[in-house]
Amino acid sequence: MLTKSFFTIFVIYHICMRYILNILVIFTLLSCSKSVKIDIEGRLTDNAASMVYLVVDGMKPDTLASAAVTRDNTFRLKGEVAEPTTAFICDDNGNTLSILLTESAKLRLRPLPEGGYITEGGPINDKYNLATNRLSDVARQIMELNYESETAEEEYESLIARYHDILSTTITDNLDNIAGVELFLAQESRGMTAEDMRVRMAQFSPEMQGLSIMKQFADYIEQYARTEVGQPIVDMEINTITGRKPLSEICKGRWVLLDFWATWCEPCLREIPTLLQAYEKYAIRGFEICAVSLDMDPERWRTFVAENNLLWTNAIDSPNDGESSAVELYGLQTIPANFLISPQGTIVAKNLYGEDLLHELAHHLGE
């Protein structure tokens, strides 16, 4: 039986992850041969902010462009980037108003009747907006499904197929511009194998393959390949509540679920009851959970662990100088993320949630 909780994870995983893990962004803007001049006008709702900023992925809010909002709530942002990329319009209240794709066209920020804003006016942004609107419509239909009906699973599978078809077709039609790159990096690549990612990347035009974000993603793919099912664990020193330990020591001779999470991650918190159930049942048989938090506030993390009586191995991703983070070593794109590791130190499954995790543990450890 499908559950709405399961779909909530799907929606966040396939639509929202570009915003869930801002602290984990692995792409930074580097130089390229063809610059893009940006010109954006807009109008905010009444007195929404006094300043707006053009923020490029990986850059500080004031490094590209900023503008004061006039008395009639209008503004104009002008800037230049070294190559096509994804950007955001933010305000001085800490809000992200709109995503946009940089292109040399006159763009405008427009308030939406239902709230929020959209950036439009250029051919690339208009293509991107059309695609995301279609994807959002399918996602809305999935959320409105009656998950108790006998046909729910069939309807769900049909809508999921439609979602992926829209996504794949849009990317295929935009292999020569940043819209295809953005949709590939932010959505389609998630859940792909490393080989599937390589194949898709090779389909993009030489100009798009030459973007710095694509070159860095190619490096990411090679790291990701080292954490696929069948690979040995990538060892690392982790900072547990009781001190630093190598992951290999924790995993030696027993089944371990390596779980990446954070106290600010709502989908992660929804998985905790399942983890508690699994630990209560299988810890006596040698099963261990190694939960690595991506929290930036160690005290908040420690307090949460203590208050929720999480008795498994708890660690926080805070590498020493010169060490790679767990995010880098395990090629994380979003959280929650987990890896089931055998007593031999081999990754046997990835991203098991809810009943899927319990079924997998029952298969290996018995009922």
Image (tube, rainbow, N blue to C red):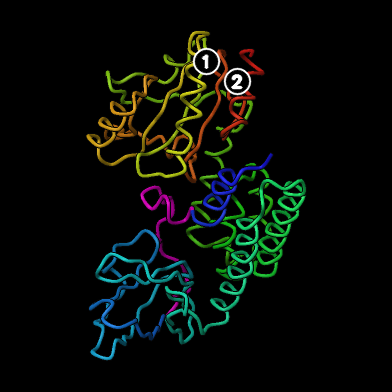
Q: Quadrant of residue 145?
A: bottom right
Query: Is 17 placed above or below 359 here?
Result: below
The residue carrying mark 1 is 281
Residue at 67% x, 18% y is: 363
Label 1 or label 2, whichever comes before in sequence order:
1
Q: Is residue 286 magenta?
A: no
Q: Is residue 236 left or right of residue 204?
A: left
Residue range corresponding to the magenta coloring: 17-37
Where in the figure is residue 197, as x and y percent of width and height? 63, 49
Within-10-Å neighbours for mark 2: few <14, some 14–19, many 20+: many
Q: Is residue 225 left or right of residue 75?
A: right
Q: Quadrant of the N terminus?
A: top right
Within-10-Å neighbours for mark 1: few <14, some 14–19, many 20+: some
Furthest-bottom residue in this view:
72
Q: Quadrant of residue 76?
A: bottom left
The residue carrying mark 2 is 361
Distance from Cα at disc 1 to Cα at disc 2:
10 Å
Where in the figure is residue 194, as x and y percent of width and height? 62, 42
Residue at 55% x, 32% y is: 227
In terms of secondary structure, where does tag 1 sit?
Answer: helix
- Amino acid type assigned to the residue bearing label 1 in the image: Lys
Where in the figure is residue 275, as x and y percent of width and height? 48, 27
Check if mark 1's residue and mark 2's residue have beta carbons within 8 Å: yes
Q: Is residue 242 left or right of residue 23?
A: left
Q: Quadrant of the C terminus?
A: top right
Q: Disc 1 vs disc 2: which is toward the camera?
A: 1
Residue at 34% x, 34% y is: 317
Where in the figure is residue 98, as x and y percent of width and height? 42, 71
- Amino acid type assigned to the residue bearing label 2 in the image: Leu
In terms of secondary structure, where does tag 2 sit?
Answer: helix
Residue at 57% x, 79% y is: 126
